[in-house]
Amino acid sequence: MTVSPGERPRSFPASERLRTDLEFREVVRKGARLHTTHYTVYRDSLGGAKRQVGISAGKRAGGAVARNRAKRLLREFYRMHKGVFPRGTRTVIVVRKPPEGAVLSSVCAELLPSLRRRWGGEGDSPCGPDISSSAS
């Protein structure tokens, strides 16, 4: 695949991230809600061509290692499935309790059908094999 300079299709640039506490709180307060076993997803519409995603894992989601792993897997899920996060929306994914032994395919299997059922989305990309984002 040839990628033009400055274009990274599977990136998560700062312009696509929710960064401040105010932004997170606004989406949670105004947005529509979706609950799954391990995650809660909030989404509101901004309009325009910008999509923004924020990922949060509080202390009730486990120790630092579990929280960081859950956030890493969710960032990779976003990179692979940008089609279910339409432009003009802000989305917050909150980790409620991290799945035991989570791998990318289990995150995809839980979130992808739920997101598509609730809000629709583009593409039919598979979740892929049990890929672990750890460097081991």
Image (cartoon, rainbow, N blue to C red):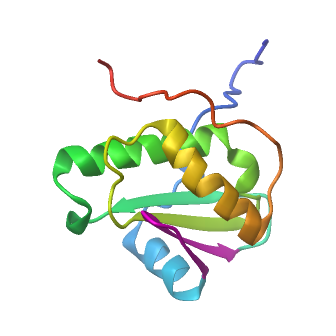
Q: Residue at x 68, y 57 (%)?
A: 113
Residue at the bottom extreme of this rendering: 29
Position of residue 48 measured from the top left corner of the image (x, y, whole percent): 80, 65
Position of residue 31 measured from the top left corner of the image (x, y, whole percent): 60, 81
Position of residue 123 measured from the top left corner of the image (x, y, whole percent): 83, 44
Q: Residue at x 66, y 27 (%)?
A: 8
Quadrant of res 132? top left
Residue at the top extreme of this rendering: 2
**Residue 53 lies within the magenta run:** no
Quadrant of res 85? bottom right
Quadrant holding the C terminus: top left
Tell how many labels: 0
Say if 112 sits above or below 95 in the image.
above
Q: Is residue 121 visible from the viewing direction of this image?
A: yes
On screen, residue 95 versus residue 31, left or right, reads left
Magenta stretch, main secondary structure, is strand
Quadrant holding the N terminus: top right
Magenta residues span 32-45
Q: Observer-nearest residue: 81 or 16?
A: 81
Quadrant of res 41? bottom right
**Residue 41 lies within the magenta run:** yes
Q: Is residue 15 visible from the viewing direction of this image?
A: no
Position of residue 69 measured from the top left corner of the image (x, y, whole percent): 32, 42
On screen, residue 19 versus residue 88, left or right, reads left
Q: Residue at x 33, y 55 (%)?
A: 98
Say if 26 sits above or below 17 in the image.
below
